[in-house]
Image: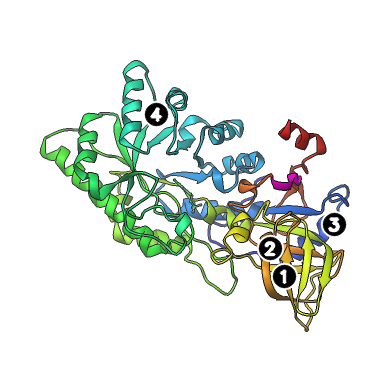
C-alpha cells in the first residue's frame, strides 16, 4: 500500500527508539518472527518513499531517475519502487531480469556494465532499454548490431573524468586508472570522433564513485564531463549538423552518514550545487539521468540479530551473534573504511539504555577470525537472548550476501513508518533453497 508522504525529508536516520518500538511490535505480531529467525532484516517503506519522492521533487520533471539495483535487489522492494514512478539502473543482465520481473518497462531501465557480452547487448537493444557503453570496443559492437537490428534504445557512453580518488579507494572510480569508462584526458579527440561516427550515440554517462567521494569531487567530475559535452555540441553546431548530445547521466554516489553525530549532505543541497554549477544541465536542452543507490536505501533498513552467547574475559567481552561477514562484508574486510552503529534490545524488544557502559566486540557466526562487526565499542550490559540492532543496512549489504559457511539468508520484513502493517518481503531461506543452491 502506497501512502502519500511529504516530499520534504522528515528525518535523516531512523532513531534507535523507533527501531526498538517496531521490533517490539514485530515480536508480538502473530506468525511473524519465530525461534528460527535468529536474525531479521527490516525496511521502512515510507522512509524509502520519502527519499525517492524528495529526489523527484527536486529535479526537472523530465529527469529519468534510475535507482541502482545493486544497492538492494529485492524484487518486492523493486516492485514498491515502481509504484513511485521511477526507473532502475542495472549493472548486469541478471539485474535486468530482476527489473523486468518487478514489472519495469524497458524505457524505465538503464543498463550499465563494463563487461556486456555481444548476446547481452543484443538482448538489451532488442528490449529497448537505455544503454551506457563502457568503452570504444563496446560502442563498435553496438554499431555492428545496429547495422542489422532496429532498436528503440537510447545510447550513451561512460566517460571517466579522472578527477582523482575519494576517501575509500575501492569505491572510487574516477582516478587516472579506473576499470570503468573511457579516460577523458587521453581520449578527448577519439571520443569526439565517435560522436561524429555514430549517429545513434547521443548520451554521456559519468559516475565518479560511491561513498567516500566527497561532494566537491562528484561535482568536479560531472562538471568536467558536462563541459566536454558542451564542447562537442558546439562542434556539431559549427558544422551545421543537427545532431547533439542530449542525454546526460550524472550517475549516483551521493554519500550517506552511518553515524547520527555526522550530518550528511542531503539531496536538496547536492541538487542546489549541481544547479548552481551547471544551470544548462537543468534546461530543456538535456534529458538528465540519475542513478542513486546508497542515498535512497542505506538509512531505510536495519537488522536485528540475536545474541547467542557472550564470552566474558578479563580483558575483553565478545558478543556472538548471527549476522557477520556473510551480510556485512565491507565492515568485516575493510573495518577502517566502513562502520555501522549498534543498539541493544532485550528479548522482548525493549531498548537497553543502561547508565553503565561495557566494552564489547561484536562477532558474526562465520568460521574465520575477521568475522567481527565492531571492536571494543561501548554498549549497555548485553546478555544471551538480547538482540543487537544494526543500523543503516539498507544498501550494499544483503545485495553482497556471501555464501561462506552456507548460512541461510534471513527473513526480510517491510513496514510503513510507525504503523503495524508488517509484510514479509522475503521468507527466510529454507533448508531446501540452500541445498538447491549448492546442488
Ligand atoms: C554506474 C553506477 N551508477 C550508480 C551507482 C550507485 O552508486 P551509489 O549507490 O553510491 O549512489 C554505482 C555504484 O557503484 C555505479 O557504479
Q: Secondary structure at mark 2?
A: strand
Tell me which label, 3 or 1, sits earlier in the chain.
3
Residue appearing at x 68%, y 53% in the figure: 43
Residue at mark 4 to residue at mark 1: CA–CA distance: 51 Å
Q: Looking at the rendered structure, which numbered label has been put on residue 153?
A: 4
Query: Do the residues under discs 2 and 1 have CB atoms within 8 angstroms?
Result: yes
Query: Which residue is disc 3 drawn over?
Result: 27
Q: CA distance from mark 3 to mark 1?
A: 26 Å
Q: Which residue is mark 1?
A: 361
The reply to whether residue 280 is visible in this rendering is no
Choose the circle earlier in sequence order: 2 or 3.
3
Image position of 18 with respect to 403: above or below: below
Number of residues whose C-alpha sits closer than 10 Å to that of mark 4, classed few (under 14), some (14–19) or many (20 or more): some
SS for callout 1: strand
419, 104: nearer the viewer: 104
Numbered range of the magenta stretch: 404-408
Amino acid at each position: 500500500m502506497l501512502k502519500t508522504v511529504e516530499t520534504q525529508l522528515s528525518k535523516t536516520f531512523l532513531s534507535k527508539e523507533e527501531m526498538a518500538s517496531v521490533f517490539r511490535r514485530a515480536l508480538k505480531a502473530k506468525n511473524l518472527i519465530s525461534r528460527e529467525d535468529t536474525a531479521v532484516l527490516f525496511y521502512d517503506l515510507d522512509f524509502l518513499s520519502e527519499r525517492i519522492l524528495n529526489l523527484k521533487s527536486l529535479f526537472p520533471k523530465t529527469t529519468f531517475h534510475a535507482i541502482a539495483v545493486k544497492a538492494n535487489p529485492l524484487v518486492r522492494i523493486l516492485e514498491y519502487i515502481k509504484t513511485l514512478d521511477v526507473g532502475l539502473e542495472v549493472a548486469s543482465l541478471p539485474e535486468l531480469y530482476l527489473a523486468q520481473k518487478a514489472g519495469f518497462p524497458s524505457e524505465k531501465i538503464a543498463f550499465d556494465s563494463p563487461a556486456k557480452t555481444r548476446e547481452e547487448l543484443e538482448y538489451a537493444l532488442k528490449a529497448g532499454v537505455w544503454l551506457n557503453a563502457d568503452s570504444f570496443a563496446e560502442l563498435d559492437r553496438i554499431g555492428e548490431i545496429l547495422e542489422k537490428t532496429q532498436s528503440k534504445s537510447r545510447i550513451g557512453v561512460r566517460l571517466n573524468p579522472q578527477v582523482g580518488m575519494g576517501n575509500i579507494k575501492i569505491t572510487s572510480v574516477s582516478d587516472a586508472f579506473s576499470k570503468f569508462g573511457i579516460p577523458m584526458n587521453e581520449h578527448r579527440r577519439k571520443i569526439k570522433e565517435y560522436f561524429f561516427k555514430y549517429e545513434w550515440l547521443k548520451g554521456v554517462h559519468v559516475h565518479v564513485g560511491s561513498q567516500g567521494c566527497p561532494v566537491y569531487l562528484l561535482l568536479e567530475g560531472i562538471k568536467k564531463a558536462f563541459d566536454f559535452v558542451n564542447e562537442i555540441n558546439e562542434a556539431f553546431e559549427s558544422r551545421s549538423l543537427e545532431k547533439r548530445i542530449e542525454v546526460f547521466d550524472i550517475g549516483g554516489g551521493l554519500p550517506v552518514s552511518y553515524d547520527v553525530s555526522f550530518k550528511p549532505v542531503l539531496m536538496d543541497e547536492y541538487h542546489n550545487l549541481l544547479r548552481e554549477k551547471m544551470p544548462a544541465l537543468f534546461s530543456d536542452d538535456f534529458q538528465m539521468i540519475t542513478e542513486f543507490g546508497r542515498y535512497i536505501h542505506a538509512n531505510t533498513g536495519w537488522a536485528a540479530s540475536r545474541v547467542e552467547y557472550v564470552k566474558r574475559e578479563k580483558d575483553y567481552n565478545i558478543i556472538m551473534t548471527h549476522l557477520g561477514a556473510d551480510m556485512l562484508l565491507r565492515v568485516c574486510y575493510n573495518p577502517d573504511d566502513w562502520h555501522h552503529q549498534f543498539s541493544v534490545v532485550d528479548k522482548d524488544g525493549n531498548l537497553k539504555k543502561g547508565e553503565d557502559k561495557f566494552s564489547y566486540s561484536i562477532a558474526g557466526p562465520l568460521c574465520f577470525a575477521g568475522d567481527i562487526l565492531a571492536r571494543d565499542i561501548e554498549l549497555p550490559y548485553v546478555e544471551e537472548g538480547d538482540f543487537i540492532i544494526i543500523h543503516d543496512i539498507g544498501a550494499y549489504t544483503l545485495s553482497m550476501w556471501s555464501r561462506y559457511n552456507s548460512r541461510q539468508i534471513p527473513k526480510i520484513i517491510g513496514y510503513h513508518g510507525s504503523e503495524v502493517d508488517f509484510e514479509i518481503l522475503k521468507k527466510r531461506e529454507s533448508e531446501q533453497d540452500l541445498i538447491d543452491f549448492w546442488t
